[in-house]
Amino acid sequence: MPYAAGDLDKGASLFKTRCLQCHTTGAGEPNKVGPNLHGLFGRKTGQVEGFSYTAANINKGVTWSEDTLFDYLENPKKYIPGTKMAFAGLKKEKDRNDLITWLKKETA
């Protein structure tokens, strides 16, 4: 099932509880354990300057979109074998849709 617009407020809550400890979203904010997500949509995997990616992430060569993130966020280690992202994923389609809806707004 592809991405469908979700609930912005629920996406914000998911980001706060599941992503914020490792990622920032604002322009010019620093990388943390994970890269800054500003400008995420339309960017290829492994391209944030100053962040140390695994070769698997760099070589994946996927351009991030609503649909690629929808697939990735279900199980990051399955989508990019060899990634160092320790996040287990969001199994519920609704949660992924909500988070992606929020990310579209906050990373633009």
Image (cartoon, rainbow, N blue to C red):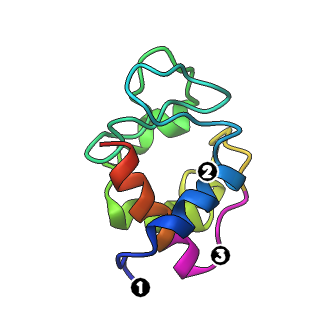
Number of numbered callouts drawn? 3
| Residue at x 67% of width, y 43% of height | 85
Q: Secondary structure at mark 2?
A: loop
Q: Quadrant of residue 76?
A: bottom right
- Picture disc at residue 91: 3
**From the viewer's perspective, is residue 8 above or below residue 85?**
below
Q: Disc 1 vs disc 3: Cβ atoms closer than 8 Å? A: no
Question: Which residue in the protein does label 1 denote?
Answer: 1
Instruction: Estimate the x, y position of residue 95 in percent, counting from the top left.
Output: 57, 73
Answer few, some or many: residues within 10 Å of disc 1's Cα (few below 14, many 20 plus, some between 14 and 19).
Answer: few
Distance in Å between CA atoms under marks 2 and 1:
22 Å
Give the spatial CA distance, label 1 vs label 3.
13 Å
Residue type of the residue flagged with mark 2: Pro
The range drawn in magenta is: 88-96
Please report the residue visible at 56 percent of the width from the left and 69 percent of the height from the top: 10
The residue to which callout 2 is attached is 81
Nearer the observer, disc 3 or disc 2? 3
Residue farthest to the top? 50
**Residues at discs 2 and 1 in contact (Cβ within 8 Å):** no
Question: In the rendered view, would you say 37 is above or below 71?
Answer: above
